[in-house]
Amino acid sequence: MSIQNVLQDVLLRLTPTESERKDVELQVKKIIDVLTTGLKKSYSDFEVQVEGSIAKDTWLSNNKELDIFILLPQETPRELLQDVLKTVKHVVGVPWVERYAEHPFLEFSMNEYKVEIVPCFKVLNSRRLKSAVDRTPFHTQYIKTHLTPRLRDDVRLLKGLTKGIGVYGAELKVGGFSGYLCELLIFAYSGFLNLLQEATSWKHGHVIDIENHYKNAYKLQKLFDSPLIVVDPVDISRNVASALTLKNFSIFIAAAGEFLRNPHFHFFFPPPTPMLSINEVLSRINSRGTHFLFLGFPAPSVVSDILWGQLYKSILALRTLLERNDFPVFRTDIWTDEQNLVVMIFELEHRSIPSVTKRFGPPVILPQHTIKFVSKYIENKNTFSGPWIDEDGKWIVETKRNFTKVEDLLARTLFFNDLETIGLGKYVAMEMTSAKIYMDSEIESLLSTNPKFLDFFIEYLIKTPKWLTKSS
């Protein structure tokens, strides 16, 4: 199929139907009416309005997320935000969860919609923000006044593409393209295909400054040091693409070029993960010639960004620990349902290593270091051979390793150490003491009881991006 035919069919699936639009309007009106009525009893000066993609008409079909902002006068004391939320809790009439960003907000479900209620300050100038979320109404207004109906459709295509290739979302778990970034990119390049064509030639540090706030691109690259730099038109101190990782920046460039060469639906609607039986998965584990170490432990009860930040920090610390003890790590990954279970995956070159290892010491021309090295090993019970001087004039010794099996190293580390001291995140360390270690085929029990983890691990083994699959 031609690019235009693919995009036309994709857009039909991404664009909300008239029925969806009416339902969203109804739900928004209900929530705004409930909040307005409830808040009027205690507050006289406020506004309640919808923000985000719904307000900008860049939302996708089947989107069930509503962002409702309560705008308070600029001079409102910051502590009053919590009082406003207390009132909201009483009037929403459904179970809620209080979340925290720069300041608290409320999250609940209503009629199948995920609703966020966010208090903010109604500042008159986007350069005089009292909190980070105060800029959101300015974002909404900017996009509403700059996007034509055609460009709004192109935003839907870009959101659909970034979702399909797995790089949509500025949250730490993803490190990808936010909805607002997608909107700005479409406006900056006057359309979806123009953006893809230009993206194929992007280099690290590419700068987009729609309003020409800066005259010097080099200065921007020094200021932000990011793969992609998109100056926020309403806040020149902010890079809208700051969350975008180099990996996802690179994936987008590659996918843009591949779509232009070979357009098909898989870029927007990935095919399902291939069905492999657990026996087939175990066979693939065995055929790789490596060894898998899995750590399963309860998911810390914290918000998503904190959770993923701690997981990324912790898996890096554990990888460092393994490699420092001579267990080279081939690849790592993390899976979690964010509620009950975390599984860390370490693919290793070796499960066990020899008892003996070489320790290289100083050259003999450094007598102070020589004395220290020799005295440490000369009558050490763990010394197999040496110390002696090698052909390069350096001291060398063959000594006994502390650990020859990777599971022993992990077990000793996890259950007997202060885990924060080796670099694990605080909340991960608290749960890691009850971690269970699975080696190779021992993971069968987790695979058989957790279909989502099974899908994830199958994708780990296959690894080829789904958008590289040829359409039939």
Image (cartoon, rainbow, N blue to C red):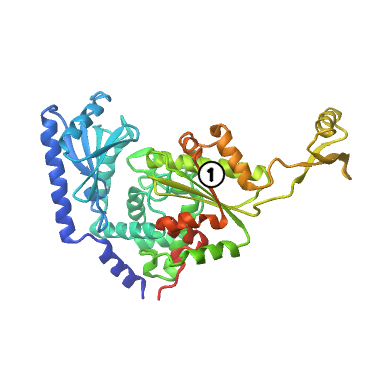
Residue marked by disc 1: 315
Q: Residue at x 32, y 61 (%)?
A: 157
User: For this rendering, which residue is in front, 411 or 271?
Assistant: 411
Residue 178 in picture, x, y percent from top left: 36, 49
Residue 260 visible, this orientation: yes
Left or right relative to 363: residue 237:
left
Q: Quadrant of residue 116?
A: top left
In the displayed structure, 205 sits above or below 159; it is: above
User: For this rendering, which residue is in front, 403 or 364?
Assistant: 403
Q: Quadrant of the C terminus?
A: bottom left
Q: Secondary structure at mark 1?
A: helix
User: For this rendering, which residue is in front, 378 or 188?
Assistant: 378
Q: Residue at x 62, y 41 (%)?
A: 321
Left or right relative to 202: residue 114:
left
In the displayed structure, 74 sits above or below 414; it is: above
User: For this rendering, which residue is in front, 252 or 42?
Assistant: 42
Left or right relative to 349: residue 467:
left
Q: Quadrant of residue 413?
A: top right
Q: Quadrant of the N terminus?
A: bottom left
Q: Residue at x 35, y 45 (%)?
A: 211
Residue 247 in picture, x, y percent from top left: 50, 52
Left or right relative to 191: residue 229:
right
Residue 249 in picture, x, y percent from top left: 47, 53
- How many numbered callouts? 1
Residue 120 in picture, x, y percent from top left: 26, 33
In the displayed structure, 9 sits above or below 358; it is: below
Q: Residues within 10 Å of mark 1 (few under 14, many from 20)?
A: many
Amino acid type at image mark 1: Ile
